[in-house]
Amino acid sequence: HAMQEHLATLNALHREEVRNLALEKDLDHTRMEMLKSQVNPHFLFNSLNILDALVLDGRDREASEYIHKLAGIYRYMLRNEEEGTVTLRDEMTYVEMYRDLLKVRFQEGFNVKVSIPPEDLSKHVIPCSVQLLIENATKHNAVSPSRPLNVSVVSDGETLTVTNNLIPKITEAQSSGLGLNYIRQQYRDRSGKGIEIIRTDDFYKVKLPLL
């Protein structure tokens, strides 16, 4: 009888563990869906406006290149929405396409400088984490050729640091903080590690652990 009770207890614990894992997976999926619902419409709206301007100006080759990079960005997002981590190489290829699209929009008012040793490219990060930090920088700062927004992405082998200068807007953009909270929670869930945020009067810096 005691053995049966013990087995029943183990079965109950197993079912509870399976249920918790399923709930955790559902929560991860919900976070990703919330992130996509916030990021995609705003980004797509701006992208279509830029594409329309290129077509109206008769810049067909640039419009074609823009479409291919835009498709590549969405392909990356769809391909990695179920992945816990991606290589830094894949993330930075994605970031390069994203940067190129933003350069069409902001021209000389926006720059990204990357300094990553080749050996670090095989390490891992959370999908879209670097892109989200760059998007946040463009969202919360005034961007113009007279006062460029400069973003740096630097790896030291242990940490990837994304830094941007601060250029206050006349009207501060509203933010839910969803993107940053998503990155923070994903790092906790996937690696048990946290991210570090440093803000001064001159710059905003986020440190992401390399996994």
Image (cartoon, rainbow, N blue to C red):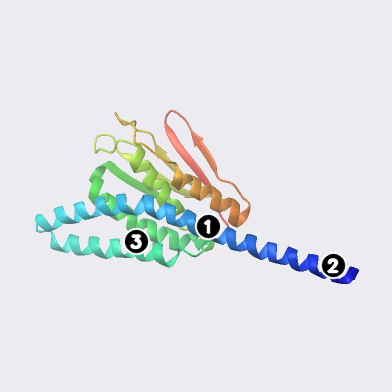
Q: Which residue is depicted at the point 19% across and 52% down?
A: 49
- Cα–Cα gap, marks 1 and 3: 21 Å
Q: Considering the numbered disc 1 on the image, is that residue within a helix, a strand or a loop?
A: helix
Considering only vertical position in the picture, is 182 above or below 165? below
Disc 1 marks a residue whose amino acid type is: Asp
Could you tell me residue 195's position as x and y percent? 55, 45
Residue 136 x/y as whole percent: 39, 43
Q: Is residue 120 visible?
A: no
Q: Quadrant of the N terminus?
A: bottom right
Which label sits on residue 73? 3
Query: In this picture, is 116 found above or below 139?
Result: below
Quadrant including the C terminus: bottom right
Q: Is residue 93 left or right of residue 155?
A: left
In space, the residues marked 3 and 2 are separated at their CA atoms by 54 Å
Residue on which the image places disc 2: 5
Q: In front here: 65 or 190?
A: 190
Q: Which residue is mark 1?
A: 28
Q: Of marks 3 and 2, which one's residue comes earlier in the chain?
A: 2
Label 3 environment density (alpha carbons within 10 Å; few <14, some 14–19, many ≥20):
many
Q: What is the CA distance from the residue labelled 1 to the residue labelled 2? A: 35 Å
Q: Amino acid at mark 3?
A: Ile
